[in-house]
Image: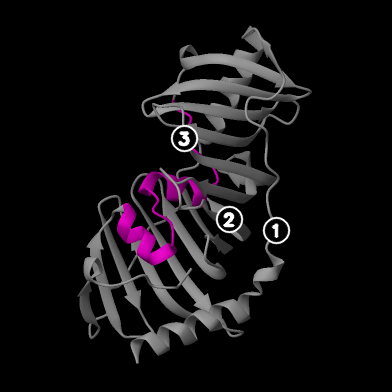
Amino acid sequence: MKRVIRAMFFMVLLIAAGCSQMRTVSRLPSAPGESVTLTPELERLYRQVASHTSKVEALDGYADLYLTTPKRKAKAYCNVQLRKSQDARLIVSAGILGWPVADLWIRPDSLFVNDMLNNRMLVGRNSGENLGKIIGLRSSFGKLTETLFGVPDMTEPVSAIESVRMVGDLVCYKVRSSSGAKELFVDAMSKELNGITYFDLYGRKTAEFRFADYQMKQQGSSELMVPREIDMTLFPDAPPDGSRSLKVVYDERVINPEHFSIRFKKPSKARTVNLDEVEQLPWL
């Protein structure tokens, strides 16, 4: 019976969402163009883009989430709430009326899922395996929240820049990081971060972010440009697994809302289940 309910729910998501409408953020070549000297002007550009990414601390909005794996494609509509380095909440809706079907509270060390269809509360540790069961992506807490924010952390100083390449107005900074290296793609004219590619200590590509359709949002007394579309792709450690991607397209959102807090309410009568003991849940 539970398998039938899961299958029916998955079909509701697919029919209501219309997966054929999914768009793809254009890909950028790795390390494009010619090698150039890191000039004071390029240093300022790097610092300016890095300073923008540090200004977003919280978000409250509504977005379409598109999931693509080697076996399936799906779409869900969510209320997205985020607090940087603290927690995230996704209220997943389905159907024409937009009824909530799942409420996810994601913390750096733990996961709580209110499965409204089956009246159960799933509780477990925040791990790549458990996130994979819920959203189909074995993502870390940091990578997932970077995708939902659309504003990744750029904490590496200018001294960490190993090389710079350019093609037209596109600048690619290769930067050393604690886990390996990053390639950051910046539009020199708009001063927008177009994408980031992550490499491990062995030089293997592990993740790729692409950002598009930047919008001006009010942030206190100033304004901030943030992308409306964010696309994260995770690459497998080894074959035969294929890449998996999560694309976020915001309909509306408020950046750094005043007096903002995330209030996740645990259902009082739902059956509690250890998330480590359940199979994959097709909500996204």
Q: Amino acid at mark 3?
A: Asp
Question: Which numbered disc covers residue 23?
Answer: 1
Q: Earlier in the sequence, mark 3 or mark 2?
A: 3
Say which quarter of the image contains residue 74. bottom right
The residue tagged with tag 3: helix, strand or loop?
loop
Which kind of residue does numbered mark 1 sit on?
A: Arg
263 and 204: which is toward the camera: 204
- Residue 157 visible in rendering: yes
> Does 223 appear above or below 16?
above
Q: Are marks 3 and 2 in contact (CB under 8 Å)?
A: no
On residue 153, which mark appears? 3
Q: Identify the mark nearer the N-term, 1 or 2.
A: 1
Image height of 146 relative to 101, above or below: above
Asked whether the beta carbons under mark 1 and mark 2 sit within 8 Å of each other, the answer is yes
Point out residue 146 in the picture as x, y percentages from the top left corner. 47, 45
Q: Residue at x 31, y 72 (%)?
A: 279
Element under disc 2: strand
Question: Circle 2 is placed at which residue position?
Answer: 247
Membership of 241 in magenta stretch:
no
Secondary structure predominantly adopted by residues drawn in magenta: helix
Q: Pick whichever, 268 or 242, lies toward us.
A: 242
Quadrant including the N terminus: bottom left
Q: Nearer the viewer, mark 3 or mark 2?
A: 2
Residue 13: where, in percent of width, then height? 55, 78
Tell me if mark 1 has few (under 14), some (14-19) or many (20+) residues whose alpha carbon lies within 10 angstroms of its own. Answer: few
Label located before the other in sequence (1 or 3): 1
**Badge 3, how many Cα within 10 Å: few under 14, some, many 20+?**
some
Q: Nearer the viewer, residue 21 or 157?
A: 21
> Which residue range is magenta in the image?
128-155
Cα distance, mark 1 to mark 3?
A: 25 Å
Q: Name, please, the residue furthest toward the front.
A: 240
